[in-house]
Image (tube, rainbow, N blue to C red):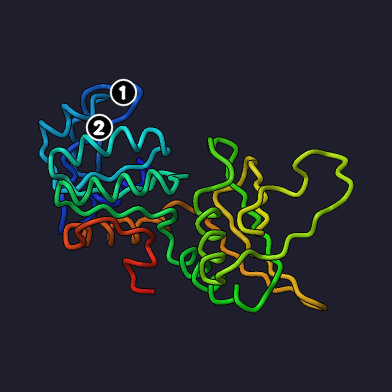
Amino acid sequence: MGAETVRALSGADDMALVGATCNTPRGETLPTPGGGVPLSTDLASMLDATRPDVMVEFTHAAACMEAAPLAAARGIHMVLGASGLNAEQLQSLDTMSREHGIGVIVAPNFALGAVVLKKLAEQAAAFFDYVDVVEAHHEMKIDAPSGFSLAIARGMREERGRDFERNQTEIHHLDETRGGDIGGVGIHSMRLPGRSAHHEVVFGAGGQTLSIRHDTLGRDCYMPGVLRCVREVGNRPGLTVGLETVLGL
């Protein structure tokens, strides 16, 4: 995602990529389509040297919560794509944004089709008592379930206003066979080579099921959403959660 974002930002004529960081030493310059930008493993020094308007971050929740205070203290807006941020961490980001007068956008998924799936699932939630979410990602993804599948489950539960029904199987021949559970929503994760990012919401009722599915076939699908957030974050003080909020869905 970092490499794809570098290409997208470098190709946008209304913004300039000024620097990059990575936890692995890779030299002092990051090659880009525009020629190259400073590269460092030290985020604080990079922010001081380049003084960006916006920091775009794609790591995981723990690393994100280490990076965010560094940007906030310098008055830098943030677009955060870290996976798995919990309610407490989101509250911390909200407080941070207000204390420093900056905008922070957290998006569990930057693909337009994915956020449309989430919106449709939330609308359908009122009409079904049973639902499962099945998600699959590449084998290198470090967390399970995906942050986006958690966001889908929480969004459906919130829209419904009460827990879904959850069948309690009496005999389990293998622990955790039924997957995780959030508000009665069963969540099942697969991690396999050949996968990118795939989410399916399956509702069940008497004599019927309803399935809503989104497949990511390439990381380029996230870039229009990333660029949209970079352009808008400075005009959105405080915390904004979800690309759907930015798009007004």
Q: How many marks?
A: 2
Q: Secondary structure at mark 2?
A: strand
Q: Residue at x 20, y 39 (%)?
A: 71
In the rendered structure, the answer to whether residue 172 lies left or right of residue 245 reads right
Q: Determine which residue is flagged by label 2.
A: 30
Q: Residue at x 26, y 21 (%)?
A: 27
Relative to 121, say whether 230 is above or below.
above
Q: Disc 1 vs disc 2: Cβ atoms closer than 8 Å?
A: yes
| Whole-percent x, y for residue 21 in the image | 27, 31
**Quadrant the N terminus occupies:** top left
Relative to 49, say whether 9 is above or below.
below
Residue type at mark 2 is: Leu
| Mark 1 and mark 2: Cα distance apart in space | 8 Å
Q: Residue at x 21, y 23 (%)?
A: 28
In the rendered structure, the answer to whether residue 142 lies left or right of residue 135 reads left
**Quadrant the C terminus occupies:** bottom left
- Near-viewer residue (163 or 196): 163
Query: In the image as oriented, which residue stretches furthest toward the front?
Result: 162
Mark 1 Cα within 10 Å, few/some/many (few <14, many 20+)? few
User: Label for residue 26?
Assistant: 1
